[in-house]
Image (cartoon, rainbow, N blue to C red):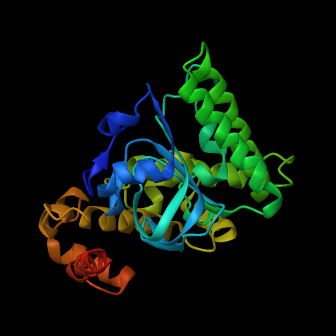
Amino acid sequence: MIQSAPIYDICTLSDFKDDDIIVSRFAPYLKKHKNLSAAHRHSFYHLLLFTHGAGGHTIDFEAFDVQPYQIYFMIPGQVHSWQFEGFTDGYIINFSDTFFQSLLLNKGYIESFPFFSGNIKDAVINLPQALHRQIAELFEQIINEAESKRPMSADLIRFLMLQLFITISRLTTPNSKAPASYNQLLLRNFQKLIEDNYVNLKLPKDYADLLYITPNHLNAVCKDILGMQAGEVIRNRTLLEAKRLLTNQQLNINEIAFMLNFNDNSYFTKFFKKLEGITPEEFRKKIFNYNQHE
């Protein structure tokens, strides 16, 4: 993985470690790990339910207001930060990408939930009041199991987490009986290929070849579902990684351009400014001035 903002794994947060999962009420977790308020990213899945608090948080440079009974989900590699106002509490769960491996035959099952797709619009959910008690009780059961150390607690935690995921996913996909269309599956495969190859493969033709379709077909699918051309989808992923890398002050602009496979710094700067409206240097200054102000 390309290094950007500080990356934390579960072992780093050792005081809360239990194999491949961390479960905690949020207030003591936040008190213990005050450094996590600055921009950072994880090597694990991360979800947080706020029950008390105000302020803001960002995920991959998208800002959200903290609200009680708001839940957010993050996948490994995403950058986020917090700016809380006053007392903040809730529940937090961090788990490794292998945590469900012993339970699920389908390795991609967790990724099938919309909030674990990496799409920011699906990752932050304000729970309806009718679900507040049910979701909080599920978190309480998970914490009680984690603290009990009883036989097979880890497996029960897995089942409770899946119940949590399914309950919340029904909010955003209430009519999900119909299977995904061919074009939806094609788009999903395209996005997975981008995730693995965006540094080296820059053109829609490269991905169309891997998908055994024509570039025109790929463009038509992206236009129909996302409202943008395939090339824009690829460029947006490169831009996102550039932003993530810019949060690492130990990397200079030339190094970032090289890591993203740009021929030179000037080409990278033109690319970044065309899409973001400001230069990489200006973006970096904006991000760190904001964090220092907060």
Foreground of the two, 151 or 108: 151
**Residue sitting at 61 percent across and 39 percent down?**
110
Residue 280 image point, x, y percent: 24, 77
Q: Does 40 sit above or below residue 189?
A: below
Residue 21 image point, x, y percent: 48, 32
- 279 to the left or right of 212: left
How many discs appear?
A: 0
Q: Does 8 sit above or below residue 155?
A: below
Residue 227 visible in rendering: yes
Q: Furthest residue to the bottom? A: 277
**Residue sitting at 61 percent across and 15 percent down?**
152
* Quarter of the figure with the C terminus: bottom left
Residue 41 image point, x, y percent: 36, 53
* Quarter of the figure with the N terminus: top left
Residue 250 image point, x, y percent: 13, 61
**Residue sitting at 17 percent across and 60 percent down?**
258
**Residue sitting at 49 percent across and 47 percent down?**
46
Q: Does 285 sit above or below residue 122?
A: below
Residue 231 visible in rendering: no
Q: Toward which corner of the image does residue 125 lie, by quadrant?
A: bottom right
Foreground of the two, 63 or 34: 34
Foreground of the two, 67 or 256: 67
